[in-house]
């Protein structure tokens, strides 16, 4: 039987199942693809079914895709095999949005765009296989060997230990320990040409708990830009209290937020007529965040005071 015919038969058999069972099989498929493992207790907890029903679900999944998973009796977990081929199609947009919102309902289908509500900016999404491999590594706290194309140095191979995927308003990044620089860094997901799981147990110094900038919180105090004639409009846009908006954010993400919102971070808010409607009140916070050079108007305060 040809591959197309086999795929068509599987789709036909899936269509014969009830919607609720297809959702449970999609959940199994999703967990295998993006986490690398799934158990009957995961099904029971997620769908509030019984043990017998979850057993039937795994039997139905194995009947459709026997090479996709293998059972480890010692852990009572089903693990993804190297022959895995997804039964369900997940779009990158749906997956990344679901991941960022905590795996809410609707992961098995694309969202229907509104005819009356639009997003002017759309992110370019990385390949789904890249996302899936990174997600499994994050979930299992494992390292990856990647090929990555840098703007400054071109393509290179390096070992990374990812722990978070982040939408910075412009692109999707993965936060990871970088073996080359021996530090935690952000990598643009669309710049990976290859990602392979190494399967090794990572040293604690390479895991999320050791990422100081990611785990540290800073407070940003935003005010209407002094160049704005009617500051009240800006206060309303950002739900300010007493003319200020205070935000507690991860230090590793602060620069992205300030850039995305076009917050003037120059001394005395000097940026004029360049679209900045906000200014950063507590400029000293820039000394404690990663990549402050990304924010509008940033000048190293030590150099500024010396000049």
Image (cartoon, grey):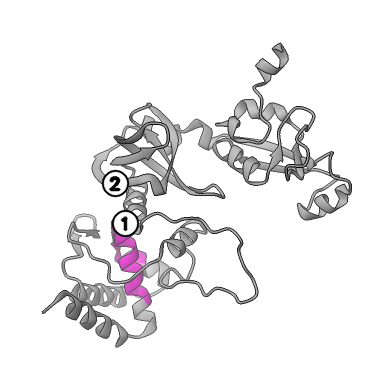
Outermost residue to the bottom: 16
- Decide: is 124 above or below 149: below
Residue 73 position in % (x across, y down): 18, 59
Q: Quarter of the image holding residue 115?
A: bottom right
Q: Residue at x 72, y 29 (%)?
A: 283
Label 2 element class: strand
Q: Is residue 25 magenta?
A: yes
Q: CA distance from mark 2 to mark 1?
A: 9 Å
Is residue 291 left or right of 298 when viewed as pictured? left
Q: Say which residue label 1 marks.
A: 129
Part of the protein shown in magenta: 23-42
- Decide: is 197 above or below 88: above
Q: Main secondary structure of the magenta part?
A: helix
Outermost residue to the left: 1
Q: Quarter of the image holding residue 186?
A: top left
Label 1 element class: helix
Q: Say which residue label 2 marks.
A: 195
- Decide: is 140 above or below 116: above
């Amino acid at each position: 039987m040809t591959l197309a015919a086999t795929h068509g038969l599987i789709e036909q058999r899936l269509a014969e199942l009830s919607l609720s069972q297809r959702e449970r099989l999609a959940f199994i498929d999703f967990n295998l693809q993006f986490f690398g493992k799934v158990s009957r207790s995961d099904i029971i907890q997620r769908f509030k079914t019984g043990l017998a029903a979850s057993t039937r679900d795994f039997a139905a999944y194995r009947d459709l895709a026997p090479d996709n998973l293998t059972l480890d009796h010692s852990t009572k977990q089903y693990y993804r095999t190297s022959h895995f081929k997804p039964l369900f199609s997940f779009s990158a947009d749906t997956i990344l949005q679901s991941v960022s919102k905590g795996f809410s309902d609707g992961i098995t289908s694309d969202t229907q765009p509104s005819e009356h509500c639009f997003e002017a900016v759309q992110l370019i999404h990385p390949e789904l296989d890249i996302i899936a491999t990174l997600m499994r590594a994050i979930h299992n706290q494992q390292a990856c060997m990647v090929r990555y194309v840098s703007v400054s140095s071109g393509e290179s191979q390096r070992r990374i230990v990812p722990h978070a995927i982040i939408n910075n308003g412009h692109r999707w990044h993965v936060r990871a320990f970088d073996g080359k620089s021996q530090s935690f860094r952000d990598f643009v997901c669309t710049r990976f040409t290859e990602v392979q799981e190494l399967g090794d147990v990572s040293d604690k110094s390479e895991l999320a708990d050791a990422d100081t900038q990611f785990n540290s919180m800073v407070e940003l105090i935003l005010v209407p830009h002094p160049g704005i004639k009617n500051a009240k409009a800006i206060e309303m846009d950002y739900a300010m209290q007493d003319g200020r908006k205070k935000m507690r954010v991860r230090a590793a993400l602060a620069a992205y937020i300030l850039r995305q919102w076009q917050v003037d971070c120059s001394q005395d808010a000097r940026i004029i007529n360049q679209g900045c409607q906000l200014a950063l009140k507590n400029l000293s916070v820039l000394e404690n965040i990663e990549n402050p050079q990304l924010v509008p108007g940033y000048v190293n305060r030590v150099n500024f005071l010396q000049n």
